[in-house]
Structures are given as C-alpha cells and as structure tokens.
Amino acid sequence: MTPENKPTSSDRFTQTIARLGTSKTDRPQSHRIQEIRNLTDTAFILRFDKNTFRFTAGQHMTLQLPGNNQMREYSIYSAPDAPYLEVLIQEVEKGYLSKKLHRVKPGDQVLIDGPFGFFSLDEDYATKKYLFVATGTGIAPFHSIALGHPGLDYKIVHGIRYGAEAYERNAYPANRYVACASRDHEGDFQGRVTDYLSRNEIDSNTFVYLCGNCDMIYEVYDLLTSRGIDADKIRTEVYF
C-alpha cells in the first residue's frame, strides 16, 4: 500500500464537493425542532420533524439556522425508519453554529439539506462482518446503521476521553460496544482505540468503517493494513 492511497483531508474536500450534487432538494428545507437531549455539558442531540426527508443509514446532512448562511455537516444519528430526524452535536468552544444550535428550543426551525455521502453498507451487508471505529461524536453514523440494520454482525470500538462520553451506549447490545476511555477508568477499556485494537485479534475478512478525527483514522488505517486487512475493506469519514 503506497502513501498516496491513504485517506487524506483533501480526499474529504473532494468528496464533500461531490456530495453537494447529490441533494434531493434545490434548497434547504425547514424542519421544526421537537426536542433537545443533553448527554453531557457540551454534547447534545437535536430531534426535529422528518417531513419528507429520506436517507440511507450512514449518510449526513447540512444544517443551518434561518437567516444565517453558516452551515455545517452532521451525520444523521437516527435510524432511517424513525418518524423523526436526529443529529449528535458537540458544542465547540470557539464554534459559531454549534453554540447557537445548543440554544434552540422546541418549536424553533432549522434548515436541512441532503442527504449526502456514501458512508453506508453494501447491499450484501447481511453476509459480512463489520468493525466500526469512532472517536467522539463520530459514532453518529454507526448509531444510525446499528438501529437501521437489526441482526447486523458488528462491533463498535468508541474512543472517548471519559466514560460519561459513551453516548447512549444502551442502544447497542453489550457485546457489540466497547468504550475506550483515555482519561479515566469508567469505560470498558482504559486507553485509546489503537491500544484496544493492538491487543485484540481482527479477522482479516472484517469490513472496517472509521469515523472521527484525522489522527485516529491515519493510525488505525496503518494498524489495520499491517494486520492484514485489505485497504479495499476500509472506509473512512473524517470529522474536523
């Protein structure tokens, strides 16, 4: 495997531009906020009306507030067959939109465009084994995939700082979710996702999806390919 085949931030830019051509609407559509669910002091879930929006588990949308041209991409957290839409958001200290979204109230409107992206399962997913590796809110697409595909053979390895950041872990069977906490001992494993993966066997036939920060994706990609996982079996989605 040559270095130019590895995922890069420029790949993300190219993919994002391509995705902007996949929207099913000519402009963002208005959706009413139903509820705000706080998971930690800074992480929260926005639930809003689904209206006619349809998507495939693993895709994302753009989100903005009316009268404001600032928009951000968020992976869809809810299952495709849920009667509502949800996104998982981390309020960023110097972030503009995330702070404003954390202050919306039920009944307020948000503007949504999409769906975008190809971070979804293949049609023959029922015959495959999956490993989903995420950091922080990068677990969002895997939550949608797990809820949208009952009976799927998967394991989620979730990199977090503290055990409290194991967002809604009860949504997954206990044997399918591993919280890797790097700063306390409240997770299932004390350490980073790379530490966990280094100490556990990975079947070479496993299909691996990585979602989170660039550093994690680079490190896990190298670890997986060195352990015999073919690059064609690895898909990535970078969160900035």
Image (tube, helix red, strand yellow):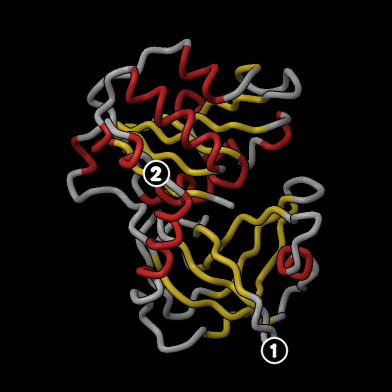
Q: Residue 159 location in percent, x, y?
A: 59, 31
Q: Nearer the viewer, residue 53 or 28?
A: 28
Mark in the foreground, 1 or 2: 2
Residue 157 vs residue 109: left or right?
left
Residue beneath disc 2: 7
Q: Is the residue under label 2 in contact with that under label 1 (CB below 8 Å)?
A: no
Amino acid type, residue under disc 1 in the picture? Gly
Asked if residue 81 shows in the view, the reply is: no
Mark 1 lies on a secondary structure that is loop
Vertical comparison of 194 with 43: above or below: above
Residue at position x 78%, y 51% in the image:
42
Q: Which label's residue is closer to the chain start, 1 or 2?
A: 2
Q: Residue 56 location in percent, x, y?
A: 35, 61
Residue 28 vs residue 190: left or right?
left
| Disc 2 crowd, CA 10 A, few/some/many (<14, 14-19, 20+) | some
Q: Report the number of discs.
A: 2
Residue 117 vs residue 192: left or right?
left
Amino acid type, residue under disc 2 in the picture? Pro
Quarter holding residue 233: top left
Residue beneath disc 1: 67
Question: What separation in Å lies between label 1 and label 2 (alpha carbons)?
Answer: 35 Å
Residue at position x 61%, y 55% in the image:
88
Q: Residue 74 location in percent, x, y?
A: 55, 61
Mark 2 lies on a secondary structure that is loop
Q: Residue 48 location in percent, x, y?
A: 60, 71
Quarter holding residue 160: top right
Asked if residue 154 shows in the view, the reply is: yes
